[in-house]
Image (cartoon, rainbow, N blue to C red):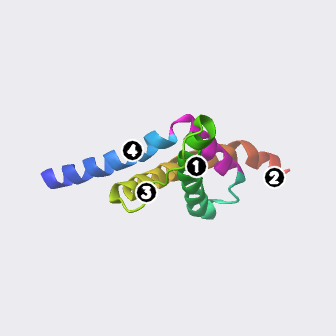
Amino acid sequence: MDQIEHFLNVIWHFLREGFDHVNAVEGLVIALVAAIIAPAWDRIWAVALGATVVHLVADVLIPVVANHASLRLPPLMDLSYWKEALALYVGYLIVIGVLMAIKRMFLSPAHAH
């Protein structure tokens, strides 16, 4: 039982980490735009991947544009960077899914007429 609980805690921490990154202003704006342009539910995987890439690129470019900092590439060879990127992807899947569901609830009846 302890192993199952530990495994569930690891999964819960992973999901919370990705959702925390998306829940910032930058992530919410990216998720909102992604949900608006998402063509259908079967494309959510690709849309979330695109949102993740936009987020990761923005994390590199925002300090350069806003603070005139030097361009620094992320630690691409570091496993923790890719774990964070995967958590971010899962977070975007969740948030974009919720926003797409809201979009469908409010916009589908208008398209039926």
The local secondary structure at tag 2 comes to helix
The residue singled out by tag 4 in the image is 17
Give the amino acid type for the residue marked by disc 3 in the picture: Leu
The residue singled out by tag 3 in the image is 86
Give the amino acid type for the residue marked by disc 4 in the picture: Glu
Instruction: Give the quarter of the image for residue 17.
Output: top left
Q: Visible in this render: residue 1? A: no
**Residue drawn at (60%, 58%), measured in percent from left and top?**
50
Q: Is residue 94 magenta?
A: no
The residue singled out by tag 1 in the image is 96
User: Quick one: label 4, few (<14), some, or many (20+) residues within 10 Å?
Assistant: some
Comparing marks 4 and 1, which lies closer to the viewer? 4
Give the mark nearest the N terminus, 2 or 3. Answer: 3
The local secondary structure at tag 4 comes to helix
Residue 112's label in the rendered image is: 2
**Residue drawn at (55%, 41%), measured in percent from left and top?**
69
Give the mark nearest the N terminus, 4 or 1. Answer: 4
Give the amino acid type for the residue marked by disc 1 in the picture: Ile
Q: Visible in this render: residue 70? A: yes
Between the residue at mark 2 and the residue at mark 1, the CA separation in whole angstroms equals 23 Å
Q: Residue furthest right?
A: 113
User: Quick one: label 2, few (<14), some, or many (20+) residues within 10 Å?
Assistant: few
Residue 7 placed where, x, y %?
Answer: 23, 54
